Amino acid sequence: MAKDFGDVGARLAAQRKSKAAAAEHAASDKPYDHQESYRLRAKMLGVLIQDARLSSARTVDDCARLLKIDPTVVESWEYGEDVPSLPQLELLAYYLDVPISHFWGQDTLESEKGRKTNAQSEYVQLRNRMIGALLRQAREEREVSLEDVAEAAHLPVETLEQYEAGLLPIPMHELAVLSTIVQKNMQYFMEGESFIGLLLQIREEWKQFISLDTDIRQFAANPLNLGFLKIAMMFGKMPAKELRQIAAGILEISM
């Protein structure tokens, strides 16, 4: 009897397998709808264009003026009824401050912004505490009392206490005065460890780089000159005595 049930089970399993194979075969025989695929791609692109525009606080008219087209064309892009060309997307990416790859991705900027909101708030709170601690450290290094600094800055002592404890953010113009009183420059309070700090540092270094003479920039930007730059950096770290010895050795070789 058990053998009979086994046979029935085997037949049912074979029947289900056969039906699944038939369904798969029928699906594979169904022609691919290219027009529907294009329509869905256009809709998705429209969502990403609108997302980038809203994220940058630009209007449809703003984008239309940039591209020298009618605003209704931009609207048709956002509704997925029409599709821009790559050069038009490149201009939009530049104007809306997004990478061009945003327009063939799947993540919207609004969703990313929502995930970063808490991190931004936490960053500001942490930085306020760090700046307050640095102010207190600089004051104590100079052996100046809280009351003396408050008097020199024309601030209430209670406010200065809250600044140092990180309970209140220090307004920028007051921080500039306080930094002078404790004899520190603004760089002392700047963030230098996190991604934001690194980005700000790179921007400052780039500002210095582009202020160099054109021939110096071209020399430094040429990868073939990297070896010369490293040698110059090495010489710059050497004590004067060792540099004189190297110069004397080079002089002997050249004579």
Image (cartoon, helix red, strand yellow):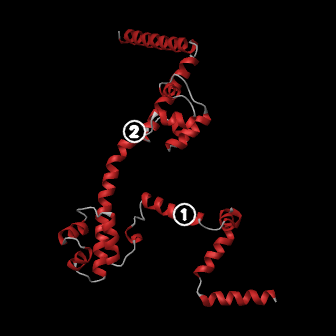
The quarter of the rendered structure image containing the N terminus is top left
What amino acid is found at the position of numbered circle 1 in the picture?
Lys
**174 or 245, nearer to the observer:** 174
Q: Is residue 63 visible?
A: yes
Circle 1 sits in a helix, a strand or a loop, which is it? helix
**174 or 18, nearer to the observer:** 174
> Percent from the top left, x then y, of residue 212?
62, 68
- C-alpha gap between disc 1 and disc 2: 31 Å
Tell me if label 1 and label 2 are in contact, CB under 8 Å: no
What is the quadrant of residue 124 in the picture? bottom left
Circle 2 sits in a helix, a strand or a loop, which is it? helix
Q: Is residue 107 visible?
A: no
Image vertical order of residue 70 relative to residue 243, above or below:
above
Q: Residues within 10 Å of mark 1 (few under 14, many from 20)?
A: few
What is the quadrant of residue 222 in the picture? bottom right
Closest to the camera, between mark 1 and mark 2, is 1
Task: Tell how many labels.
Answer: 2
Residue that appears at 34% across and 52% down: 120
What amino acid is found at the position of numbered circle 2 in the picture?
Glu
Which residue extends farthest left? 158
> Percent from the top left, x then y, of residue 160?
22, 70
Q: Which mark is residue 110?
A: 2
**100 or 29, nearer to the observer:** 100
The quarter of the rendered structure image containing the C terminus is bottom right
Q: Which residue is mark 1?
A: 207
Residue that appears at 48% across and 33% down: 61
